[in-house]
Image (cartoon, helix red, strand yellow):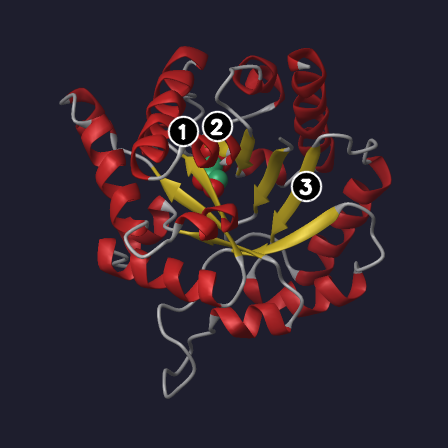
Amino acid sequence: MRNIVAGNWKSNKLINEGQELINEIAKGLPSLDSTDVIIAPPTPYLAHYSRNFVATNGIQFAAQQCSANSMGAHTGEFTASMLTSCGIQHVIIGHSERRDRFGENLDVVRAKVNEAIAAGLHVLLCCGESLDVRESGNHFDLISTQLSDAFQQVKVAQMSQITVAYEPVWAIGTGVTASAEQAQEMHRFIRERIEEWYTVKTAESTRILYGGSCKPSNANEIFSQPDVNGGLIGGAALDAKSFLSLIEASETSQKHSQ
Ligand code: 13P
């Protein structure tokens, strides 16, 4: 199974700065034998980038979210089908920043997943616990709830459109990374839940990414865990050199696991 290294730019970079960054990344890309590279820039640039960089070997684009509604009178929203009409193949849903700051509760996340699946998008579904939840020992229950709720209407055949991203909130943008053991433990737990809810084959073929202060200095260790299939990267995706070294780390971990 191929890894994914995805860069979530969040609300960073102006359009030309982003373009330069993509050019630099494209120039330095190694041959992508076993890694899919996805970049999630701010939404206003998506159609432009996907058109301009269509010839850029290997880089795919994602939106950082989409509407929970389909087309209609929803001022300011953009639907999943609008993304596919712009040539976008991927969407991040359920990022903790959206859950915490923009009122995306379980119902909203589930509705967004359903819209994205129906539009044919590949979903990077985020889950993750706060420090309070981890310290109270309820992190496995919370992750199980976040995922089982989001998967309610997702059929087994549609699971090929889902990648899970485990992003402990206490590790996002803090410089504190989950240890390789903590990441592996949670990724294993997630894979076991997918097996319980779907099939062994689905569990084995679903990619589970780690996110949260993932950087060149810790990527080798994290990516080499058996149930870690790459990363969802924030800060380190804003610099070509560090993003490229995360892609290299993914390629290396895949070679060692063969
Ligand atoms: P950082 O890599 O900056 O911690 O962000 C992770 C993240 O939220 C990616 O979606």
Q: What residue do we see at 57% from left, 25% from top? A: 215
> Horizontal placement of 191 versus 196: left or right?
right
Can you identify the residue that label 3 sits on?
A: 37
Q: Is mark 2 within 8 Å of ligand 1?
A: yes
| Cβ atoms at labels 3 and 1 below 8 Å apart | no
Identify residue type, mark 2: Ser
Which mark is nearer the camera, 2 or 1? 2
Which mark is nearer the camera, 2 or 3? 3
Neighbours of disc 3 within 10 Å: few (<14), some (14-19), many (20+): many
- Look at the image and tell me in which quarter the C terminus lies: top right
Q: Residue 194: where, in percent of width, then height?
A: 36, 35
Can you identify the residue that label 1 sits on?
A: 174
Identify residue type, mark 3: Val
Q: Which of marks 3 and 1 is nearer the N terminus?
A: 3
| Cβ atoms at labels 2 and 1 below 8 Å apart | yes
Q: Which element type, helix, strand or loop, lies under badge 3?
A: strand
Q: What residue do we see at 80% from left, 64% from top? A: 52
Q: Residue 46: where, in percent of width, then height?
A: 64, 64
Residue 213 — which label? Answer: 2
Q: How far apart are marks 2 and 3 (CA)?
A: 18 Å
Q: What residue do we see at 51% from left, 24% from top? A: 228
Q: Which element type, helix, strand or loop, lies under badge 2?
A: loop
Q: Earlier in the sequence, mark 2 or mark 3?
A: 3
Q: What residue do we see at 49% from left, 68% from top? A: 80
Using the rendered view, name the quadrant where residue 255 is placed: top right
